[in-house]
Amino acid sequence: MISFNLQMKRSEFRLDATGEFGSGITAVFGPSGAGKSSLLDCLAGSVRPDSGYVQMDKTTWYSSLDKVWVTPENRRVGTVYQDGALFPHLDVKSNIEFGWKLIPEHKRQLDPLELADFMGLSNLMSRGPSTLSGGERQRVAIARSLATMPRLLLLDEPLASLDTARRGSILNYLKRVHAEFDIPMIYVSHSISEVVAISSSAMMLEAGKVVGFDHPTALLPYASKSETIDKFENIFDGVIGSSTDYLTKVEVNGVEISTGRQSKCMGERVMVSLGANQIILAAERPENISARNIIKGKVVETWSNLGKVFVHVDAGPKFIVELTENALKDLGILIGCDVFLVFKSSSVAVFDT
Amino acid sequence: MYDIPIVALSLQVAFVATGLTLPIGLITAWLLVRKNFRGKFLLDVFVSLPLALPPVVVGYVLLWLVGTQGWVGQISHGLFGSTVAFTWFAAVLASSVVSFPLVVRSFTVALAGVDPKLEVAAKGLGAGSLRTFLTVTLPLAQRGVIAGVLLGFVRALSEFGATIIVAGNIPGRTQTVPTAIFTRISSGDTNSAWRLALVSLVLGVIALAVHNWLLNRPRSFDSSGLDRSDGPPS
């Protein structure tokens, strides 16, 4: 568990944040300039705040009161940056082994080669970073951090420089990493969809202040206010099912979702994404409708803010649907109601994992 | 063949001077590029000062420092019973001080070109400041550092003004190629003066050619874009 209380002033910007993050994946999100990266820098120790404290489990990393300061190289905090920050003069293997080699031999817990295999990098080991794709670079950066068995893994917008198709893949790797290594992670992003897809709790920052700290979906209404935060996308893991001439079905958590025709084999694992504002809610099963997806579910929760409503529907996979306040009233949707999710197959995007 | 000891001494002086300016120059450049401290501006000015002064003045100040009146001279006199004035090491000092600004300038540019984020990443992986410098910063700044070293070496080889004041022009002891040329020109010995001038020319051309080649050579890790010629895409 990491707990912190930080105050820092840098010319016009002021950071004042307090929080306590558990062993899961915690997201820190907010618009650009909100202080997300500054918060990470303070936790990693690359920036020294003006006052406050940082406490990791029972170790104090920083305390202005007791004049404690642990240097970044002694904190064992792994950081994965937006562009990977790989060492350009070293090949993939040497990058992964950089921190691992600094650990005394009897304390090394992981085999870098197995780690590379786990991250799907085995056949890239002798390549230079400049020859890698964005997704490959991020995987090397993650493996490089993991090799040092960090006490905490910080992910600073790790998907921001990737195209949409590669994002799902890295998200999946991160989930697997968390399941396998049980390292607390802090995931910084300005995309609420990523935050909901990966984290178990989320802190929202705005202008250097904490404006919310809750279950990620509960922060959706706040996020929807901010123009710099991406529109919400539902992101699911799925498996390719049967195809017809024009449609391919993807099975997601017991539900079949129709998508445009995919050139993938049956059984292949994919990620699907679907905008929260692309889904129509119906109180009864619609008849004679062109939309190919009609999925029955139960309303779990609703949140509203400034005329926008987010409805959480459990249909096997948990969907977030964005409505207006009026639509919600007219439909008479209550928590526990059965509803039908209606969306076009063309609204669903399918990505490789 | 009585030129050989002169050339040898010149090379010796230039090598030792380069050996001195390399570590001190690296530390100075690192301070100037990566650290913020009070008096940074003064350090910057002080480092560049020999560039702005006539070398004769630099030599005169050095002579005063290492002579029996100066504090450096008093320390060395107390320790070794003599000062370094008018020894070959005085020539090393003169060459070092005069070439120092050039060396530091090259190093500063080289270090500033290294993304600080990579250093932060190295520290996050457990590397201390020195190791980060040696395994990340220096290899990435390598080209500019080597170029700076060569530039300093060339400048040390050609040093005249400060050297003749603080080390003198004693044949067989402190006479370097430039001071020897000066003596020969003064005494009208033009043939042998030209011979040494030619030696200077050759040494200078070689060092500058290597310097320029290093700066223009593409680095292996600079290859841009997604060159995916080997290995399957994933």
Image (cartoon, coloured by chain):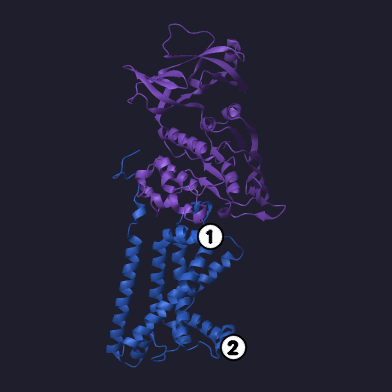
Gap in Å between the C-alphas at discs 1 and 2? Answer: 37 Å
For marks 1 and 2 on the same chain, the one whose residue lies earlier in the sequence? 2
Quick one: which chain is blue? B
Question: What type is the residue that disc 2 sits on?
Answer: Gly
Quick one: which chain is purple? A
Please say if A266 is above or below B42: above
Q: According to the image, label 1 marks what residue?
A: B129
Q: Residue at x 40, y 54 (%)?
A: A90
Q: Nearer the viewer, residue A111 or B19?
A: A111
In the image, farthest residue toward the bottom: B187
Please give the label number shown on residue B78: 2
Q: Residue A244: x, y in percent?
A: 33, 16
Please give the label number shown on residue B232: none
Residue A83 shows up from this direction = no
What SS does tag 2 mark? helix
Tell me the quadrant of the picture where the N terminus of chain B can be found: bottom left
Same chain shared by disc 1 and disc 2? yes
Q: Residue A45: x, y in percent?
A: 59, 51
Please say if B158 is above or below B129: below
Mark 1 or 2: in front is 1
Question: What type is the residue that disc 1 sits on?
Answer: Ser
Q: Residue A39: x, y in percent?
A: 60, 44
Q: Residue at x 56, y 12 (%)?
A: A338
Chain identity of mark 2: B
**Which image quarter: residue B110?**
bottom left
Chain identity of mark 1: B
